[in-house]
Image (cartoon, rainbow, N blue to C red):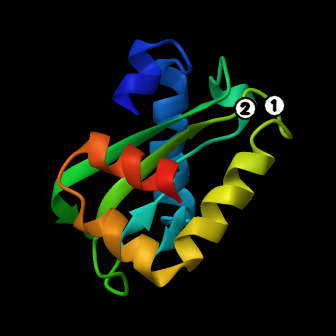
Amino acid sequence: MSSLLANRYINENYIQAIKDSTISNGPYYILAPGVAMPHARPECGALKTGMSLTLLRQDVQFTDEDDGIKLLIGLSAADSDSHIGAIQALSELLCEEDILAALLAAKSEKELADIIARA
């Protein structure tokens, strides 16, 4: 999320909204084993539509049921519709076991971007 913040896709309120929502609702944004897409409602501080990729050095476990998150896909949606196509395409990628395994085995954000571009 830091790159979305630094590039003015979101403001600090957006990050706080994700934290608050996680406390209230749990990690609703876990998409697949090892992958989460933290996001909040557009009115909570989304300034432009965009995504960021963050490869975590250590897995983060949100619940007792998950195996730990290694890949965060930050999402900023400036409205309720503009991000739908990107999420659909990403969901299709994550359903491909070999692509998901490659993403989780990546060693850098550049490698992540290359895997997504090739898919």
x, y percent for residue 95: 58, 78
In this rendering, the answer to whether 63 lies above or below 80 is below
Residue beneath disc 1: 79
x, y percent for residue 23: 46, 56
Give amino acid for label 2.
Pro
Q: Are marks 1 and 2 in contact (CB under 8 Å)?
A: yes
Mark 2 residue element? helix
x, y percent for residue 68: 28, 73
Residue beneath disc 2: 42
**Along the horizontal axis of the image, is 4 left or right of 48?**
left
Q: Which residue is found at the position 57% from the left and 40% from the top? A: 75
Report crowding for label 2: few under 14, some 14 to 19, many 20 or more residues within 10 A (C-alpha). some
In this rendering, the answer to whether 61 lies above or below 20 is below
In this rendering, the answer to whether 43 lies above or below 74 is above
Q: Which residue is found at the position 34% from the left and 76% from the top? A: 101
Mark 1 residue element? loop
Observer-nearest of 39 and 26: 39
Observer-nearest of 80 and 53: 53
Mark closer to the chain start, 1 or 2: 2
Asked whether the viewer can see residue 95, the reply is: yes
Q: Which residue is found at the position 81% from the left and 35% from the top? A: 82
